Amino acid sequence: MVVVVGGCGVGTSTSKASPVEPGGSSTSPTGESAVVAEGSSMRLAATLSGDTEVPGPGDENGSGEAVVVLEPGRSEVCYDIRVDGVAEATAAHVHAASAGVSGDVVLGLDPPDDGSVAGCATADGMLLQQVANDPGAFYLNVHNEDHPDGALRGQLGVATEP
């Protein structure tokens, strides 16, 4: 069962700097199961592309990467999203769905409107634990005016490099 935090724009962004930077890679699209111990964090990554957007088409010229750090015990998620080759982003979200399937928004993030964004948001700790337990069942996507259903998408997976 997925706990839906709400619709677009869910989560309260904070002004503190994000402790994450893209550059790591992620595991298989199905993700890996892991339980985040109390007080610890889990680092996830996603490679963003338009050809994985559902329903498509996404932006075939765009690409990007995202790193997401979950801290369920603190009810906090921090993220760093970087995109290239797409029109100005208007929204970014984490959705609940496996690859090839469109899913409901479970967490709203600030969009990378100038090509990148880093920040932190509060979120339900149970939701963050669900994402940590099965990251491949969630994806991150970025929207813009040209692609209101989604310009870029990437399944979350456990980051293999810091």
Image (cartoon, rainbow, N blue to C red):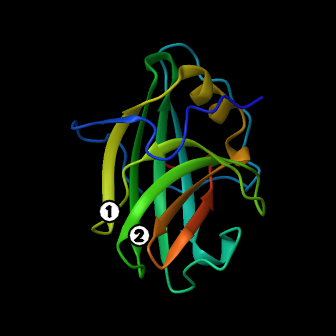
- How many marks overall? 2
Where is residue 67? Give x, y as percent.
46, 50
Q: Residue at x 49, y 47 (%)?
A: 8
- Give the percent coordinates (x, y) of residue 32: 73, 41
Query: Compared to 9, does 56 lie above or below?
Result: below
Task: State if disc 2 and disc 1 touch (CB < 8 Å).
Answer: yes
Q: Please say if 31 is above or below 49.
A: above
Query: Which mark is drawn over residue 132?
Result: none
Q: Residue at 72% across / 58% down in the picture?
A: 102
Which badge, 1 or 2, is on the more N-terminal residue? 2
- Amino acid type shown at disc 2: Val
Q: Going by the image, does 73 lie left or right of 17?
A: right
Q: Which residue is mark 1?
A: 116
Going by the image, does 137 lie left or right of 93? right
- Which amino acid lies under the numbered mark 1 shown in the image of this protein? Ser
State the residue at coordinates (65%, 70%).
Answer: 53
